[in-house]
Image (cartoon, rainbow, N blue to C red):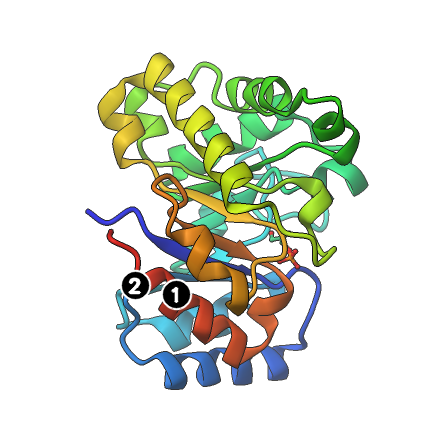
Amino acid sequence: MSRTMVAGNWKMNTTPTQGTALVREVMEKVGNPPTKVVFGVPAIQLLAVQKLVEGHPNYAVAAQNMHQEQSGAYTGEISAEMLVDAGIEYVILGHSERRDYFAEDDELINRKIIRALEAGLTPIYCCGEKLDIREANNHEVVVGKQVEEALSSLSPEQVAKIVIAYEPVWAIGTGVTASKEQAQAMHDHIRRMISNQFGSEVAANMTILYGGSVKPDNATELFAEPDVDGGLVGGASLKADDFAAIIQAAGSRRS
Ligand code: 13P
């Protein structure tokens, strides 16, 4: 099974009308994609975008968040079961914007991951260090701790169903991308951790995406690294031409 994937995270951008047009344009440009493509759309667009990708097995839809409880009095929230019933396959969890603006920590994210897996969703778990941590050369320790806490108490079978996205916070929305060497080093570190804790087979099959200012002009060299299995793309996923080019870049990867 190929590990390669390109996921777009639209964040709080596009109206439903714009979002539908964007998905149609990407699908027209790309046709049958050479890799798994995931559209991470605002909640209000999940159903409409899911309809557009239905019957196209290489396209899928991700929610950008969900609640950790099964149901109940949580006004404004969306549950894993609701997503599954709507045909959604993926959920982005632990994004740095959720951590920073909505006070999510790895203990909460761990609960969300468990809930998502129980319901049958694939979590795209985001981790990544801030600039001061990178400058202090402490990034492997900090990201390692994030991953360890987020995956704590999970079985190897559960971890095998997770996608990890390494997103250095200093590279998100800044136009500053991690170098291919920096990305590869962290992805290798994460894969080794997974191997030590959950077994070499789980690690070898795990999709580890890089996120942080992925653009058409840097995607090919990032995705050429052996442990960079594709991208979680913010700004460039909002432009059909750019997202299509990044999808093609992932398609030229070995597997
Ligand atoms: P940018 O690609 O805009 O840097 O965003 C990355 C990101 O946060 C994806 O989740």
| Residue 252 image label | 2
Mark 2 vs ligand 1: CB below 8 Å: no
Q: Name the residue under label 1.
A: 249
Q: Which residue is drawn at 31% across and 64% down?
A: 251
**Residue 56 sits above or below residue 88 on the image:** below
Q: Which residue is drawn at 56% across and 68% down?
A: 237
- Badge 2 local density, few (<14 within 10 Å), some, or many (20+)? few
Given residues 122 and 252, the one toward you in this image is: 252
Provide residue 132's location: percent of width, then percent of height. Answer: 79, 29
Given residues 82 and 212, the one toward you in this image is: 212
| Residue type indicated by callout 2 | Ser
What is the CA distance from the residue labelled 1 to the residue labelled 2? 5 Å
**Residue 239 sits above or below residue 197 on the image:** below
Q: Quadrant of ligand 1?
A: bottom right
Given residues 106 and 128, the one toward you in this image is: 128
Residue 156 vs residue 22: left or right?
A: left
| Residue type indicated by callout 1 | Ala
Which structural element holds mark 2?
A: loop
Pointers 1 and 2 in contact (C-beta within 8 Å):
yes
- Badge 1 local density, few (<14 within 10 Å), some, or many (20+)? many
Residue 165 vs residue 157: left or right?
A: right
Provide residue 188's location: percent of width, then percent of height. Answer: 42, 29
Q: Which residue is drawn at 48% across and 78% down?
A: 23
Residue 235 vs residue 203: left or right?
A: right
Provide residue 176's location: percent of width, then percent of height. Answer: 69, 53
Q: How many labels, in total? A: 2
Provide residue 209's location: percent of width, then percent of height. Answer: 45, 45
Q: Which residue is drawn at 26% across and 65% down?
A: 57
Q: Is residue 27 visible?
A: yes
**Residue 161 sits above or below residue 54 on the image:** above
